[in-house]
Amino acid sequence: MKINGEQLLIIQKLSEKYPDRNKFSPKELNGIAEELNIDKKHVKSLLAQIPRVERGIYDFSIVIKFEKKDDEMSKAMPKTDIIENDYQDIYVPKQDDFYIRWGHTKDIETIIKSNIFYPVFITGLSGNGKTTMVEQACAKLKKNYMRVQISPETDEDDLIGGFRLVNGETVFSDGPVIRAMKAGALLLLDEIDRCSNRIMCLQSVLEGKPVLIKKTGELVYPSKGFNVIATANTKGKGSEDGRFITASILDEAFLERFNITMEQPYPSATIEKKIVLKHMQKYDCVDEDYADKLTTWSVAIRKTFLDGGVDEIISTRRLCHIIQTFSIFKDRLKSINLCVSRFDEDTKTAFIDLYTKIDAGTYVEAENNNQKEEDNQF
């Protein structure tokens, strides 16, 4: 016999409503399904597995016996077990000693420290530290944190919870949103603009109100300290230039539930150089001249991008990738070359040409390295 979660709820409700009975009619089952807001198709498939003892009457004792616990004192009724969550995915992030506090970091820390429910929407181009900013704010304040990566497939079952098969039994498992609410943690909804309309199940969550888990009937109240921060590359209105082709247009009612929107730009040249130098310290490859030239290069490309001269951009994250590559190969130009190879050939060539103009010494360095590679072949 295969009984799904919705059917378990119907059986449980019947047993609660009629504790001294085990025979029921389809009309009674349909009435219970309607009360629980469950599709009546689940009633039909359930009845197909239950013995009919007379016209219009089905004997559910087989189900009660099947679900009955060993304890004879317990009620002879099916129970929907709830998985005990150990909340291993809710934790205080590790503090990064090389992180540079900049931008909205101080404001995010102030919001988290207040312990007030105050949903925040952070928008900005890719690779400018939105997620890291929230993570490191939680690390500094020793705040429990949960990050949920949003995709077009993310739905209510992923977020609120659903029935899972555990040791041959169907049990309900809280989703990350419910776990964060119960733990009073900060819930980070990463890349929220990649969602579908199924994200609307978070409406009441974003109002700071209790959430009814429809599949179990449990009403969950948010614990003190619970908050929601969402990150996105757009403002929820889609991407007109096509750079973020999978970005969704978010419902206006959904966006209105965020108290504020923070626009995260790329850091200034001064801040970005500090970030680059810290990353060099992290990978033990400090080269202040290289850091200065990389920063000059990235700022020039962004200015050209804003003026419409190029279609791509060098993000702060990309600079960090270059530094990590430099720590391995010890070659300035090769590190840049490898890290911009994801762009089309024209863009890649333009970026490398610009850097060689900024750092003329890389011409000689590149020639010497090419000669060494040729020598090594013989």
Image: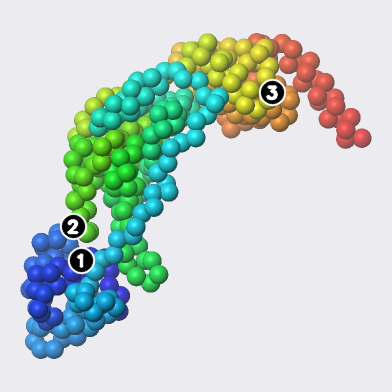
Q: Which residue is labeled 2 in the image?
A: 217
Density class for disc 1 (Cα within 10 Å; few <14, some 14-19, many ≥20) is many
Measure the alpha-carbon separation of dots 3 and 2: 57 Å
Q: What element carries label 2?
A: loop
The residue lying at 13 percent from left, 89 percent from top is: 53
Q: Is residue 294 above or below residue 116?
A: above
Position in image of residue 295 (x %, y %): 58, 14
Q: Closer to the N terminus: mark 3 or mark 2?
A: 2
Q: Which of 264 and 82 is in front in this view?
A: 82
Q: Nearer the viewer, residue 166 or 131?
A: 166
Q: Is residue 80 left or right of residue 20?
A: right
Q: Which residue is labeled 1 in the image?
A: 9
Q: Pick the quarter of the image with the N terminus.
A: bottom left
Measure the alpha-carbon separation of dots 3 and 1: 60 Å
Kindly tell me whether residue 244 is visible in this rendering.
Answer: no
Q: Is mark 1 on a helix, strand or loop?
A: helix
The residue lying at 88 percent from left, 35 percent from top is: 377
Q: Which residue is labeled 3 in the image?
A: 285
Density class for disc 2 (Cα within 10 Å; few <14, some 14-19, many ≥20) is few
Whether pointer 2 and pointer 1 mark residues with C-beta atoms closer than 8 Å, the reply is yes
The residue lying at 30 percent from left, 40 percent from top is: 184
Q: Which of 188 and 49 is in front in this view?
A: 188
Q: Closer to the N terminus: mark 2 or mark 1?
A: 1
